[in-house]
Every structure is written in C-alpha cells, then in structure tokens.
C-alpha cells in the first residue's frame, strides 16, 4: 500500500460521508431499523457505507475491504485489509447527541497502521499522515483541500491524577470497578471512537472498554492513537490488540498513554 495515495483518499471519503450523515442528522426525521444482532442502523449508516465502499473499491480494487454494514458478506479472511465503520455511535446519532464518527482504517499484518476518525457534528477530525504520525485537522473541512493540521501526542501521564474517558452509552459497574483501581483526577464520557482520539491528544490518559466491540469500531481510533504514541492492549493479559480475528469481534481492551501504570483486570 502506498500511504501517500491512501491518506488523501480516506480523508476525502470521510468528509464526504460526514456531509451525507449530517444532511440526514439535521432532517426532521430519519428511518431507523434493527439488525439481526439487535443493534440499530439508520439510513445515514447505509448511505455513508455505500459512499465509502464505492470510493475505496475504485481507488484500491486489489485490497480486501471489510465494512460493518456488509460484514455478513465477508467470506474471505486476511490479516491485511481496509476496514470501515461508516457511522460509529449510531445510538448517539439517533438520540442527536453528536458523538458519532466516520472511521476508515488500514490493517496490515493484524495491526491498524493508518486511519481517519471524523466527528462531523463535533467539527473534529483526526488522522495519520503517510509517515504514520497522527494529526488533528482544524476546520472548516473541505473534501478537496487539506486544512491546517496540528501534530497530536499522548499525555505525559501523572499516575496520581489520571484523566479517564469511558463510554457514554455503555458504561457499567465492571468499567467503574476497573477505573477505581487508579488514582483518578477526573473522568469524562464520550461516544464512539472519539475516546481513542481524546487519549491521542492528551485530553485523557486512559480508556478501558469492558464490553463488546467489533474491529470496525476500533481500528481507525487505534491507528490514530498509535500514531500519537499510545497503545491498545487486551484487558485480560495486556497483549497487543490484534485484527483479522474470527468474526471481527474484539475482546475487552484498554487504550492508554504509555506513562500510565496499568492495573491488572
């Protein structure tokens, strides 16, 4: 994969998908359906998926593509592929809370190496450059022209005063029990893959996820966090979180700045 070719394409597609999502988000009403796993899907998910999939297949026809909305049709397996969640945080979208994102990532040999996370309702966009380092682009966002970008880096964490970010829709007693093992200065809630990005920018030190996620939920945020110096490990044994797993399901995990003294599960 030529990263110089990849990054402009995934950046452009994320903005175009974000524009389409916001058109539907700002409408008076939109359709919501329930998938076979009881999770919701909207016309915004489907429209963004169609747009991104067509763009990626046109630009990179020889690269395997995995998307959330087409996951049932993914029969082939591999450890190198493009992976897309066209609208991560559908519950946030439905409830008009704004914390939803467009996610596109490249996984190589089981590791997310490049990615983009765009939060159109929050006017925030994070992505890796061709060299693998991560930046935040300042809006307004144009699909055709890259705006000003600022390098992002994880915090130099103080283990006696950590900032923790956790799920807005899925926080539970098990999550709180794990967070309580740390000396926490403050905590904040965020939806979707924005949590990875808050660790990547140094706005948070630690994001534990004690709950179900899929690889398309995490790959782009994982890539952005890695490019900012952060890490993502499995909750139980602290081994690196890998991609290309059977069914694309993740174990529980912890995303963090390396200065954090990780506690056992």
Image (cartoon, helix red, strand yellow):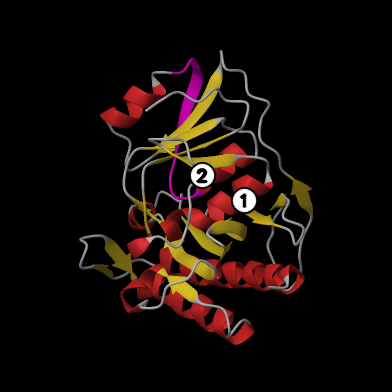
Label 1 crowd bin: few (<14), some (14–19), many (20+), radius 10 Å: many
Residue 211 visible in this rendered orientation of the protein: yes
Q: Nearer the viewer, residue 154 or 143?
A: 154
Tell me the quadrant of the picture where the C terminus can be found. Answer: top left
Of callouts 2 and 1, the N-terminal one: 1
Q: Quadrant for the N terminus, please.
A: bottom right
Any magenta on residue 183? yes
Element class at badge 1: helix
Q: Residues within 10 Å of mark 2 (few under 14, many from 20)?
A: some
* Residue in the image at 49% along x and 15% along y: 183
Residue 209 in the image, given as x and y percentages of width and height: 39, 39
Q: Quadrant of residue 111?
A: bottom right
Residue 240 shows which numbered tag?
2
Q: Is residue 242 left or right of residue 14?
A: left
* In front: label 2 or label 1: 2
Q: In this rendering, is residue 136 above or below 140? A: above
Please report the bounds of the magenta region as a residue range.
182-193
Question: Which label number is shown at residue 224?
Answer: 1
Q: CA distance from mark 2 to mark 1?
A: 15 Å
């Amino acid at each position: 994969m030529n990263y110089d070719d990849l990054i402009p394409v995934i950046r452009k597609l994320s903005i175009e998908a974000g524009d389409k999502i916001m058109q539907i988000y700002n409408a008076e009403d939109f359709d919501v359906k329930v998938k076979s796993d009881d999770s919701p899907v909207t016309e915004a998910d489907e429209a963004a998926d169609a747009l991104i999939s067509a763009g990626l297949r046109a630009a990179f026809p020889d690269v395997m593509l995995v998307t959330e909305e087409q996951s049932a049709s993914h029969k082939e397996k591999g450890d190198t592929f493009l992976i897309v969640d066209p609208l991560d945080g559908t519950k946030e979208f439905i409830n008009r809370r704004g914390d939803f994102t467009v996610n596109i990532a490249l996984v190589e040999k089981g590791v997310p190496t490049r990615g983009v996370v765009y939060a159109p309702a929050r006017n925030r966009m994070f992505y890796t450059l061709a060299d693998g380092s991560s930046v935040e682009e300042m809006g307004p966002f144009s699909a055709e022209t890259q705006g000003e970008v600022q390098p992002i880096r994880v915090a130099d964490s103080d283990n006696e005063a950590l900032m923790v970010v956790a799920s807005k829709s899925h926080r539970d007693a098990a999550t709180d029990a794990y967070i309580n093992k740390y000396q926490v200065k403050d905590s904040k809630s965020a939806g979707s893959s924005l949590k990875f990005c808050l660790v990547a920018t140094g706005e948070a030190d630690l994001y534990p996820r004690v709950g179900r996620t899929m690889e398309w939920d995490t790959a782009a945020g994982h890539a952005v966090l890695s490019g900012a110096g952060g890490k993502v490990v499995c909750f139980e044994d602290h081994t690196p979180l890998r991609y290309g797993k059977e069914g694309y399901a993740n174990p529980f995990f912890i995303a963090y700045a390396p200065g954090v003294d990780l506690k056992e599960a």
